[in-house]
Image: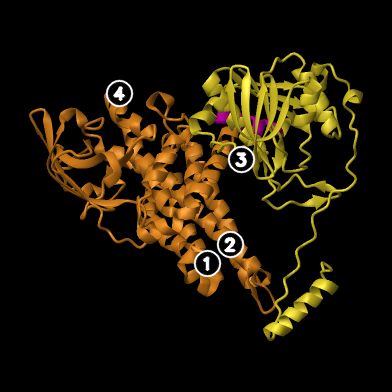
Chain colours: A orange, B yellow
């Protein structure tokens, strides 16, 4: 048993922290307030190799591991939930399915530019009537000659407007038992028939790009089907297992930021002639926050480590996502409470942490779905 | 070009520093590359990219300094050398460091050596100039621009906010000032590549030095933190009275008038 990070992991964490504090932090309030997707920041992150951390060098990545990637996602989440969410989605949802399931040609064509950080990718799973019940997908793909024709609608798709390619799931046929076969298809940007709108007015992660995609007779060559034509369902379950680790890392970042801000404020704020950090009511809140942040981080790193070891990590990544996202929400809420009236003001940033944290209890599987995943792993 | 950088691992003065038993507490202190040495690393990489050659980063320190050397390698330096004095020396001063570096450079044929202007911990600014003296090469301090053309070197240096332009020639030692460049972040591919780059570890023995040869010429008698800043005073009343009170306080309390 060894809890020590490697030198490369330490160095990456320090580099991402420095970059996040110097480049992203000063703009975090505006990114949220104006709902501006920070495209230039993603260009910088791409140049630093952050978008390709967990992919091998031969596909344009850095050849790092999941632990390193989790550390980077935490550091970005610590300063800006919007940037953190788009980062996690670009790597875990945009690029990962191409890496895990794509053919060699698909990897060269679609994964390499993402891993090199030259472009962003996106993953379209959710539909207006297929959220937690992803099996209820209505989008269809019909093989006509050497093309698939795709029709349907996707909603709440992260980074779609800025994506070079979008991987979407669609029903491509029926199995013998009458159940739908779901496959995934790579749709390049600007394919005729695909329209993308980003009109959502969100509670939090407002600077992260979230889009609605309408697919009307979208034609893609039949070789754009991702990996096993009948394996779409399994593919996205695996993709979401990995995605949970990055959402959990982001949650740890927001929880840590909440603790940092609350502690700093409590030591400075004087009431009744002394710093409020001298009062047990405040101390107990801070102690709980610190403990939960550390527990959440340990769970996230364990799930990441299991993934790196090639061991099963479905249950652990669900533990991590569930506990970390709920920790982030609680910590942000307590950080506001400790700040009192100031905490309710945008300038103090903790109110943003709460709004951003709320998304993490919903996106990539609600807390309820995480509990279902865990229960199934227990054999229920 | 054969390019060398002198690098020092220092504690981060922006973090809280705790002194216990007259020593800076190691636990809790954050350690970084001395920020002025970061300019030196960045400039060394730029010079190499423009003129070819190799960048070697050298530090005199202990085992833990490896992290800062690896960071310099991740930024793009080619090789690094850790002269580890942990087992040989209890204490040292600038004389010690210069003496060690002089021995190290004896067989190196360096074209240019870049160092920080000062280290932010002790801020003596001595090691660079004293080493240049021992190696009998020109030394230009606090540089903010450097152009190398063959053997000729044109330098701009910061002189208390003004610029001084200087012509000199290789081999040369320079110390780097803020404004010279914007040090890059080590990229992810850089961090991964750094793992495979050479990090040579030397001890005094390897440089044919005895402990007596490098014995310090000065002794630190005390280390203490600056006094805590006291709360400011807000004067009240009419402007006339406030001015009078201020003048009297400046005379009697602050004693600056």
Q: Are marks 1 and 3 on the same chain?
A: yes
Left or right, A372 with reference to A264: left
Left or right, A36 with reference to B113: left
Ranked by sequence position, the earlier of labels 2 and 1 is 2
Distance from the alpha carbon under mark 1 to that under mark 3: 29 Å
SS at circle 1: helix
Which residue is at a point 79% across and 39% down the rendered structure image? B124
Q: Give the range drawn in magenta.
A: B65-77
Q: In this view, does A363 lie above or below A56?
A: below
Q: In which quarter of the image is residue B199?
A: top right
Q: Which chain carries label 1?
A: A
The percent coordinates of residue A114 (x first, y second) are 35, 34
Q: In this view, does A197 lie above or below A272?
A: above
Q: In the rendering, which numbered label is found on residue A288?
A: 2
Q: Do the residues labelled 4 and 1 touch (CB within 8 Å)?
A: no
Ranked by sequence position, the earlier of labels 4 and 3 is 3
Ranked by sequence position, the earlier of labels 2 and 4 is 4
Q: In the rendering, which numbered label is found on residue A104?
A: 4
- Residue identifier under label 3: A3
Residue A157 appearing in the image: yes
Q: Are marks 2 and 1 on the same chain?
A: yes
Which residue is at a point 82% across and 51% down the rendered structure image? B20
Distance from the alpha carbon under mark 2 to that under mark 4: 48 Å
Label 1 CA crowd tier, 10 Å (few <14, some 14–19, many 20+):
many
Q: Do labels 3 and 2 share a chain?
A: yes
Q: Are marks 4 and 1 on the same chain?
A: yes
Q: Who is closer to the viewer here, B51 or A343?
A: B51
- Residue identifier under label 1: A334
Label 3 CA crowd tier, 10 Å (few <14, some 14–19, many 20+):
few
Does A158 appear in magenta? Answer: no
């Amino acid at each position: 048993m060894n809890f020590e990070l490697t030198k490369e992991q330490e160095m990456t964490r320090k580099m991402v922290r420095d970059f996040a504090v110097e480049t992203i932090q000063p703009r975090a309030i505006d990114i949220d307030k104006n709902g501006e997707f920070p495209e230039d920041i993603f260009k910088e992150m791409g140049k630093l190799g952050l978008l390709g951390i967990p992919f091998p060098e031969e596909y344009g990545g850095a050849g790092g591991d999941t632990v390193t990637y989790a550390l980077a996602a935490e550091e970005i989440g610590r300063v800006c939930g919007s940037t953190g969410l788009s980062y996690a989605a670009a790597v875990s949802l945009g690029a990962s399915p191409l890496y895990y399931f794509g053919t060699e040609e698909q990897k060269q064509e679609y994964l390499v530019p993402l891993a090199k950080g030259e472009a962003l990718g996106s993953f379209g799973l959710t539909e207006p009537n297929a959220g937690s019940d992803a099996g209820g997908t209505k989008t269809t793909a019909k093989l006509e000659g050497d093309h698939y024709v795709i029709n349907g609608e996707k909603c709440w798709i992260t980074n779609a407007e800025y994506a070079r390619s979008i991987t979407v799931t669609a029903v491509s046929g029926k199995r013998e038992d009458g159940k739908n076969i779901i496959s995934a298809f790579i749709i390049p940007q600007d394919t005729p028939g695909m329209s993308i709108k980003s009109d959502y007015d969100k509670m939090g992660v407002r600077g992260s790009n979230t889009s609605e995609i309408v697919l009307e007779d979208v034609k893609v060559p039949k070789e754009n089907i991702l990996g096993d034509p009948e394996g779409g369902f399994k593919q996205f379950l695996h993709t979401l297992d990995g995605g949970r680790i990055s959402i959990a890392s982001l949650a740890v970042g927001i929880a840590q930021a909440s603790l940092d801000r609350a502690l700093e404020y409590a030591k400075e704020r004087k009431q009744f002639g002394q710093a409020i950090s001298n009062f047990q009511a405040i101390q107990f809140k801070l102690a709980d926050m610190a403990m939960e942040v550390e527990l959440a981080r340990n769970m996230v790193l364990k799930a990441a480590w299991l993934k790196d070891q090639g061991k099963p990590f479905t249950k652990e990544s669900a533990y991590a996502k569930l506990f970390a996202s709920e920790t982030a929400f609680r910590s942000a809420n307590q950080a506001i409470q400790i700040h009192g009236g100031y905490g309710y003001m945008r300038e103090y940033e903790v109110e943003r942490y709460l709004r951003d944290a709320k998304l993490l209890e919903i996106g990539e599987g609600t807390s309820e779905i995480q509990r279902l995943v865990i229960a199934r792993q227990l054999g229920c | 070009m054969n390019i060398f950088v002198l690098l020092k691992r220092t504690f981060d003065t922006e973090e809280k520093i705790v002194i216990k038993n007259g020593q800076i507490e190691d636990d809790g202190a954050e350690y970084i590359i001395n920020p002025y040495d970061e300019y030196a690393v960045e400039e060394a990489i730029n010079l190499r990219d423009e003129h070819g050659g190799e960048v070697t980063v050298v530090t005199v320190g202990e085992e833990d300094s490896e992290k800062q050397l690896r960071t310099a390698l991740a930024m793009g330096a080619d090789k690094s050398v850790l002269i580890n004095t942990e087992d040989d020396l209890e204490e040292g001063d600038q004389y010690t460091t210069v003496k060690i570096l002089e021995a190290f450079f004896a067989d190196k044929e360096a074209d240019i050596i870049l160092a920080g202007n000062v280290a932010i911990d002790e801020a003596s600014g001595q090691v660079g100039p004293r080493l240049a003296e021992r190696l009998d090469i020109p030394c230009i301090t606090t540089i903010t621009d450097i152009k190398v053309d063959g053997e000729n070197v044109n330098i701009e240096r910061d002189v208390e906010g003004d610029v001084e332009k200087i012509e000199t020639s290789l081999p040369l030692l320079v110390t780097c000032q803020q404004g010279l460049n914007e040090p890059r972040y080590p990229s992810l591919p850089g961090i991964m590549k750094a793992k495979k780059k050479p990090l040579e570890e030397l001890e005094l023995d390897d440089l044919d030095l005895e402990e007596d040869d490098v014995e310090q010429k000065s002794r630190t008698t005390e280390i203490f933190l600056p006094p805590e800043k006291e709360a400011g005073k807000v004067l009240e009343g009419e402007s006339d009275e406030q001015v009078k009170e201020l003048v009297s306080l400046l005379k009697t309390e602050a004693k600056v008038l």
